[in-house]
Image (cartoon, rainbow, N blue to C red):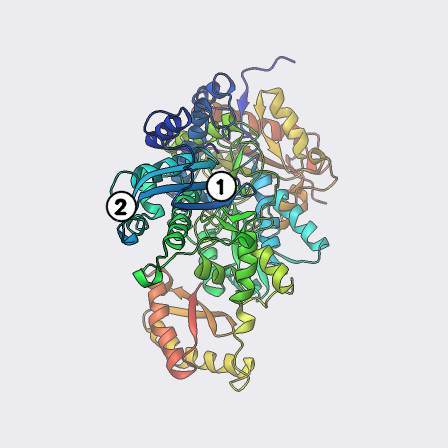
Amino acid sequence: MAWEYSEKTKQIFMDAVQGKPGTHLGEIENPDGEGKHGSIVCGDAMKFTFRVTKNDDPLKDVIVDAKYLTFGCTSAIAASEALCCMIEGKGLTPIEALKIQNQDIVDYLDGLPQQKIHCSVMGAEALEAAVVDWATKRGVDLAAQGVTLSGHVPEEDEGRVVCKCFGITEPYLRRKIKELNLRTIEEIISALKAGGMCGACRYAPGGLQDLLNETWGAGEPAPTTLASEPVAETGPSPFQLYRKIEQVIDETVRPVLKGDGGDIELIDIKGWKVYCSLKGACAGCMGAARTLQLIVERSLKDQVDERITVIPV
Amino acid sequence: MTTPTLIYADSNATTRVAPEVVEAMQPYFGKEFFNPSSMYEPALHVAGAVKTSRQTVADFLGGVDPSEIIFTSCATESNNTALFGVAAANPARKHILTSAVEHPAVLEVCREMERRGYEVTQLPVDRQGQIATADFVRALRPDTLLVSLMHANNETGVIWPVGEWARITKETDAGIMFHTDATQTAGKCPLDLTGELAQVDLLSFSGHKMHAPKGVGALFVRRGTPMRPFLLGGHQESGRRGGTENVPYIVGLARACRLSKEHAEDMQRVARLRDGLEKKLVETVSHVEVNGQGVLRTPNTLNLACHFIEGESILYELISRGICASTGSACSSGSLEPSHVLRALGVPFTAMHGSIRLSFSAYTTEEEVRVIADVFPQVVSNLRMMSPYWDQKKNQPREET
């Protein structure tokens, strides 16, 4: 599917490619801060450089010039350009510039397609790397300034993107699945967000389920089904349970229903699930299903076992 | 042979493409020919047409999310995708629950699954083509992977309460996936996947039974349903079905979905025509049975079993008078057995080979149905005059039969 970019994204891209005055393509020589993010393997990479007016107190350094070199798609280039526009000439210190998050870049571009959000992430990560570089050169302890770094993706995590919505790679997923002992797709979604948006990567070839199987072996976990909720070994046998349920229906439930010209049929019992069907006058009653829930389930819960649920049939 | 104006009464086999659908498709064979995956502006417009069509189909199915629609080449592909795809994503479960009267696009896949080590339960039907819900409940197992039960039968038109069965399935075990082949109801009955069918996980249908062309279908896959792609080889359909989008046909399918809403009143009219025809034929033809009599059916279908005569000869007699219909008789099918649906219904053997299916569409006229009502009894009568099981003198079955 071709991407639907906002007019602003397309315009910024065109201006940048044509090198219009005021755009920021290029590289600053001997920069005060330099950050890279991405790689040619991933399909997009950015080198971000900035210059500051140096103050005696490095914390008062102000960014005056920002440039980028970007290998990537329309939105990667537009995001890079947007980042520079948002930083340059705003009188920001490098630490203030760090407040720019990927969402700010997305907003600046009037939105990005969901699967292109990672382009804005790349901009934010390159900025962070450049600020770290500046801090090192200027002897600033970022942690002491209360800056928490979101942590750029280490090189060992670069590789094939599995979850396109969040730009999460195969090496990263493999590492995290082991580190966090993730056993199911649901656990991956909760822990890493991967697969949580469109869901297309969950069962795709080479997707989350395949990575789980390759990590933990294809020996499938037992299905969480009726079989895994057996009538407890210490509880009644299936035969005893059936007799008790039938007894309650015969002695408690059926007389009530018969009073209204109806009847009840016990269809099946699976584990703690009891399948019943209402007959006669009750079957046509508006509240037939509710009647079952109220009368039958309550009676069975009270007189047989609290774990019983009734499924109207 | 000169055929008079053709009366088409075989709409469960296929339908004519509506003029509105042809018109909607036309630009996408011409100036809008681009690949929707291409990046340039004109292709974006084509991608937009696919997106709009997906939204239309999502609306048609009761307002589901467009991301839950996969475009396919036909209902058979949709069914293959649903069954094989769900099985591949749930390798721990090995039991499939289906019925004896499914379309081959489900039954043959189930047979293949048996060869691969799955266990398949085929629920039986009664004489009117219905499944006892108690049978259905008792057949659900702890290792059940998938339930696949058709919404309406292609031969009899009998509609099943799949919404209710899906609810029972999900209350039993949310891990069991519920699939329904809605090829015979799409365009004829409302399909509400956010209402009556809210517990259905997967739903198949095709375009050519509802006035779109042959060669396009769709599969609804509810968000969160574990399913591996069946057709690999592309990022299309969010990676769930590779292959360049069949844009003109997808646009045509969407137009047909909108058209079916405009046809809703015609369907009520068709139901009245069908009911009138059924009444008239039962009155005027002796020894005839209606398959699916008195139960909920698609509004357009009438399946008759005529004793002591053979369906294929009925068909030829009908076509010589310009009427297109179909039969479940053995001679017509290429195999030597009568339709598996009629056998499952337990149609008496004297009538098994004499079944005729008449199926109408929104374009069927009152006049056409009147002609059928006049012609059909004559055809049956003519053939019985030749039947060795018919006493020609007394005009009744021979006593020994």
- How many numbered circles does the render carry? 2
Q: Secondary structure at mark 2?
A: loop
Which residue carries the number 2 mark? A92
Q: Quadrant location of residue B4?
A: top right
* Chain letter belonging to callout 2: A
The front one of B143 and A297 is B143
Farthest residue, direction bottom = A234
The front one of B344 and B154 is B154
Q: Quadrant location of residue B335?
A: top right
Q: Quadrant of the C terminus of chain B?
A: top right
Q: Is residue B52 positioned above or below B290 on the image? A: above
Q: Secondary structure at mark 1?
A: strand
Q: What amino acid type is highlighted by mark number 2?
A: Leu
| Mark 1 nearby-residue class (10 Å; few <14, some 14–19, many ≥20) | many
Image side of residue A246 versus residue B311, left or right = left
Across and down, in percent, residue B75 comes to 56, 39
Asked whether residue B373 appears in the rendered view, the answer is no
The residue that appears at 69% across and 55% down in the rendered structure is: B114
Which residue carries the number 1 mark? A45
The front one of A245 and B395 is A245
Q: What amino acid type is highlighted by mark number 1?
A: Ala
Image side of residue B4 versus residue A10, left or right = right
Across and down, in percent, residue B360 comes to 49, 30
Q: Distance of mark 1 from mark 2, alpha carbons? A: 25 Å
Across and down, in percent, residue B245 comes to 53, 31
Mark number displayed over residue A299: none
The front one of B308 and A248 is A248
Q: Quadrant of the N terminus of chain B?
A: top right
Across and down, in percent, residue A165 comes to 45, 47
